[in-house]
Amino acid sequence: MNSSSTSAGAKAVAVFFVIVGLPFACFGLWAYSQAFRLIGGPAGSQSFWYPFVFGTIFSTVGFGFVFLAIAGSRKYSQKLQVQAEHPGEPWLWRDDWAAGRVKSNTKGSMVTAWVFAIFWNLVSWTATIFALPNAMREKGASSYFLIIFPAAGIVLLIYAIRRTLAFVEFGKTCFEMASVPGVIGRDLKGSIQARFSHSPDHGVQLRLSCVHRYRTGTANNRSTNETILWREEAEVSAGQLFPGPAGTTIPVSFHIPPDAQPTDQRTPNDELIWQLEAIAKLPGVDYHDVFEVPIFRTAQTPTSEREEKSQKLTSGFGAPETSRPQHLTVRVQQVAGGTEFYFPAARNKVFAASITFFAAVFSTIGYFLAHSRVSIIFPMAFGGFGLLISYFALQMWLGTTRVVIGSSVCYQSGLLGGGRIREIALSDITAISDRIGAQSGNGTGTPYYDIEMNLTNGKKLTLGRNIRDKNEVEWLEREMSRLAGISKREMTVTAR
């Protein structure tokens, strides 16, 4: 799509927002005029508060749409101009990316939280004030149902206040990049500038994630989904923090794998973004920042595996191997047939409990719908989805896997230690790798990893599911590969 057609589309969207907003604004101004006319009226006359509240709501919505249309159109025109000046350098399309000082989303999330909380409370409290007296007189269930919306508004206000406290406490944080952009196959280095009133005793946890953000649905049914494609984590101890311009400097250093996908925000409904997170436990308000960082393929991206390994060793990555974690969720021991890796049941109780909760909710809704007069489609849909989630919950609570690696690989997976035993020759194994099999939350949520074994016939066998700790996953993957002789075979092929 060329720039002229894109610009025309942006103008059409701006005109649409103005057309939608003007009727709201006009009705709001009319409501204000009625409110002012009622001020100082005789006793017993209609209160001016009702039209005043309606005027505030409709004026805010109407003029908000108009403002967004004008400001958005102007900002989009500036973006198109920058894109035309730097067509092959998308990391220069954002001002903070071009300057190498990536802004956090703390201020944006705070403003969004306040806008949404204020709008929700204005609408919900106004509707409740008008509808609740009639509902109370009828003494029906609707009176209790109405209270849900103001209660949700209070929760939103609390969240907005917490975001405000975080913004006031830590200031305008930013991530200063050592070089722009972050290059795939190279290192992402820099420092986060924040303001800590207290030094974090347990240090700062850093996360670098590649996230697929996509939007589904149409009109009022649109929803935003975020899937974590890749994540690396690191711990920065309190002793590694040092004073900086804003108060505290947090050093950042990650290696970006050569097969990673670059940032892609050309399509608003289907994006690939890279997020750098910093998390620290502090007295009062905990610290949690998120930065969208530019990661791209450039001329500096390694073109061969040898160059990639050389760069990792030069930068210090890959030199020390992952050590055995102090606390393993998987039992590793020597048995008669070799080394046993036993994945016990209920390893992730919190995750299993959350899935069980959702299964209970959908199953309960399906049960009540089945005993109502609605179409049979609705109870079947909710009940069927509840049963499906219940199956996953059962697997998480009771599912076990046993892998023994010796002269061959013995594999057994089932409920409470059961399941058919399979034996696989070591020569039939091509690789043992990991992937993100599940996650809780959105792009800043928690990923859970599966360990997979690739076979010569192209099939894959899942050796372990839903492992939370990335260090444990990497250690298990390396140990299994070493015992299966995969590393030695790769070295032999490389030597040839």
Image (cartoon, helix red, strand yellow):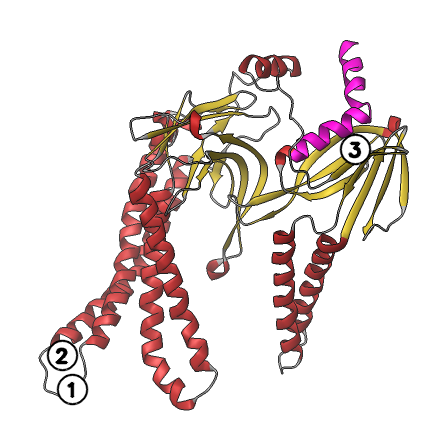
Q: Is residue 471 left or right of residue 445?
A: right
| The C terminus - image quarter | top right
Query: Three-letter amino acid code at disc 2?
Result: Leu
Name above or below for residue 260 compared with residue 110.
above
Q: Is residue 82 visible?
A: no
Question: Percent from the top left, x then y, of residue 396?
Answer: 71, 53
Q: Are marks 1 and 3 in contact (CB under 8 Å)?
A: no
Q: Secondary structure at mark 2?
A: helix
Query: Three-letter amino acid code at disc 3?
Result: Asn
Pointer 2: what residue?
Answer: 38
* Image disc number at residue 116: none
**Residue 489 on the magenta segment:** yes
Q: Could you tell me which residue is drawn at 53 percent across and 36 percent down?
A: 209
Question: Percent from the top left, x then y, of residue 158?
Answer: 36, 58
Q: Are marks 2 and 1 in contact (CB under 8 Å)?
A: yes
Name above or below for residue 36 compared with residue 180.
below
Q: Residues within 10 Å of mark 1 (few under 14, many from 20)?
A: few
Pointer 1: what residue?
Answer: 45
Q: Quadrant of residue 27?
A: bottom left
Query: Three-letter amino acid code at disc 1?
Result: Ser
Q: Which residues are magenta?
A: 472-496
Overall secondary structure of the magenta stretch? helix
Residue nearest the observer in this picture, 64 or 472: 472
Q: Of label 2 and label 1, which has the lower sequence position?
A: 2
Q: Of label 2 and label 3, which has the lower sequence position?
A: 2
Name above or below for residue 393 compared with residue 206.
below
